Image: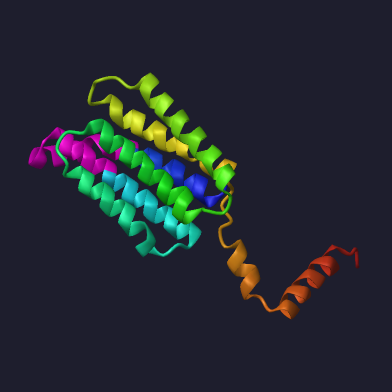
Amino acid sequence: MNKPIRTTVVFALVSGLLALPLTQLLGRYGGYPAAFKWVLWMYLSIYALLLARWSRTRLLSILFPLALLLGAVFWPGAWIGFLALALGVLCWVRSGICFSGTPIRALSAELITLVGGITLVGTLGSGSMAAWPLGLCLFILVQALYFYIIPADIGGKIKTASLDPFEHARHEAEKVLAQLPFP
C-alpha cells in the first residue's frame, strides 16, 4: 500500500471520528448548517494540502479553489450548491492541479470515486446527526480508490532526475554484481 492510499485511509478514519465533535463545537457559535459547511471545508482543505504535497505542487495553486469554496461556506442555505461545489473543488484540485498527467484516465477515476462515494453515502445516509460522520468517513475511504486507478509516483521523478548519469550507471552495475553468485 503506497503512501497516498494509506494516508487517505487514516485521514478517513480520523475525519469520521472527529466530525461529530467538531460540528457540535462549531455549531454552538454559528448554528448547525454553518458548522457542517465549516467542517467539510476544513477537511477538504487538509486533503488538498496532502494532495499538493504528494504531487509536489505549489500551495498557491490550490489557494483559489479553496478560497472559492470558503466563500460558499458563508452563503446562507444552498446545501446542494455547496456540496456540488465541494465535489467540483475536490476534482479540480486532485485531477486538474495536482495529478494532471492523464486526462482520460483521471476523468474515469474521478467518475468512479465520486459516483461510488455519493452512492455509498446516499445508500447509508439518513437524516440523523450521527449518520453523517459515518457517511463522510466512507466517502473519503472510497476516494482512496483514486490512487489505485492513477498511481501516484511519489519521489520517482525527482530521484532519477537528480542523479548524475554516471552515478545511475554505477548503481545499476552494483545491482547486477550483487546478484552474481560469488563466494
Pick the front one: 3 or 79: 79
Q: Residue at x 32, y 51 (%)?
A: 45
Pick the front one: 120 or 104: 104
Up/down of 45 relative to 179, above or below: above
Residue 78: give x, y in percent of width and height.
Answer: 21, 33
Residue 162: give x, y in percent of width and height.
Answer: 62, 75
In the displayed structure, does residue 172 sit left or right of residue 82?
right
Q: Residue at x 55, y 38 (%)?
A: 108
Is residue 76 highlighted in magenta?
A: no
Specify start and end residues of the magenta stretch as a single range.
16-40
Residue 105: give x, y in percent of width and height.
Answer: 58, 43
Up/down of 109 relative to 154, above or below: above
Up/down of 45 relative to 161, above or below: above
Is residue 25 highlighted in magenta?
A: yes
| Secondary structure that dominates the magenta span | helix
Q: Where does the N terminus fall, quadrant-wise?
A: top right
